[in-house]
């Protein structure tokens, strides 16, 4: 037990233990790790803001559910008009709802909603991750940045993203911030030694 009883109690709760990470030089520490830097947040039009995950899912499940139910409703109508039993179509709405909910969660987890830039690192939050309760940020290096006519293609960590200009209202501020992050990342070899 140390001299400071509060510090000992603090460390016993496990709050000061961090997962091991490779030793970085001071320059790499300042360039790549955003913990000591202020980050800039950029939001797309898909940002859920204060919308909870169940409400976000409810808004996004409507279209896939409609697309799945349309053939089932047409099939049931034809079966009834032809005089066949329509009970075969009873399990289709719950199955369609399950498929639509699964697809909606999958697509929301792949849809970038927020981008944080700090130093040479970038964190991308999907619409699912950004909805309250939001998950902690995962900072990765920016490896590639390309501007096409209507999109910005970035590779953050090992994941490529296509950011469409129409979906990012702050694109004129986001692009220079990403260029600066790429330049800072290029100053330090990756992986840092």
Image (spheres, rainbow, N blue to C red):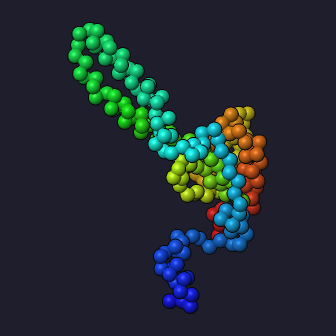
Residue 25 in which image quadrant: bottom right
8, 190: nearer the viewer: 8
**Residue beneath the point at 54% across and 47% down:** 131
Viewed as shown, does residue 64 lie left or right of 86? right
**Residue beneath the point at 49% across and 45% down:** 53
**Residue beneath the point at 38% across and 33% down:** 97
Residue 164 in which image quadrant: top right
Q: Residue furthest top?
A: 82
Relative height, residue 86 to residue 98 (above, below): above
- Asked if residue 109 can be seen in this view, the reply is no
6, 22: nearer the viewer: 6
89, 110: nearer the viewer: 89
Viewed as shown, does residue 121 lie left or right of 83? right
**Residue beneath the point at 57% across and 43% down:** 48
Q: Position of residue 151 (x, y in %)?
A: 69, 37
Residue 150 in which image quadrant: top right
Q: Position of residue 177 (x, y in %)?
A: 75, 51
Relative height, residue 5 to residue 43 (above, below): below
Q: Position of residue 36 (x, y in %)?
A: 69, 66
Q: Position of residue 74 (x, y in %)?
A: 36, 16
The quadrant of the rendering that contains the C terminus is bottom right
Relative height, residue 95 to residue 126 (above, below): above
């Amino acid at each position: 037990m140390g001299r400071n009883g509060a510090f000992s109690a603090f460390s016993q709760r496990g709050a000061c233990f961090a997962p091991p990470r490779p030793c970085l030089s001071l320059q790499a520490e300042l360039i790549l790790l955003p913990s000591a830097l202020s980050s800039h947040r950029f939001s797309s039009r898909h940002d859920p803001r204060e919308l909870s995950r169940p409400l976000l899912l409810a808004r996004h499940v409507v279209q896939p559910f409609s697309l799945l139910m349309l053939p089932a409703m047409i099939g049931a109508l034809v079966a009834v008009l032809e005089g066949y039993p329509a009970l075969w179509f009873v399990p289709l709405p719950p199955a369609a709802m399950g498929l639509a909910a699964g697809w909606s969660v999958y697509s929301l987890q792949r849809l970038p909603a927020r981008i944080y830039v700090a130093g040479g690192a970038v964190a991308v939050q999907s619409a699912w991750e950004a909805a309250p309760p939001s998950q902690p940020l995962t900072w990765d290096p920016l490896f590639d940045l390309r501007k096409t006519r209507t999109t910005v293609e970035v590779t953050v960590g090992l994941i490529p993203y296509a950011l469409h200009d129409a979906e990012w209202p702050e694109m004129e501020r986001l692009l220079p911030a990403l260029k600066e992050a790429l330049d800072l990342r290029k100053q330090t070899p990756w992986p840092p030694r």
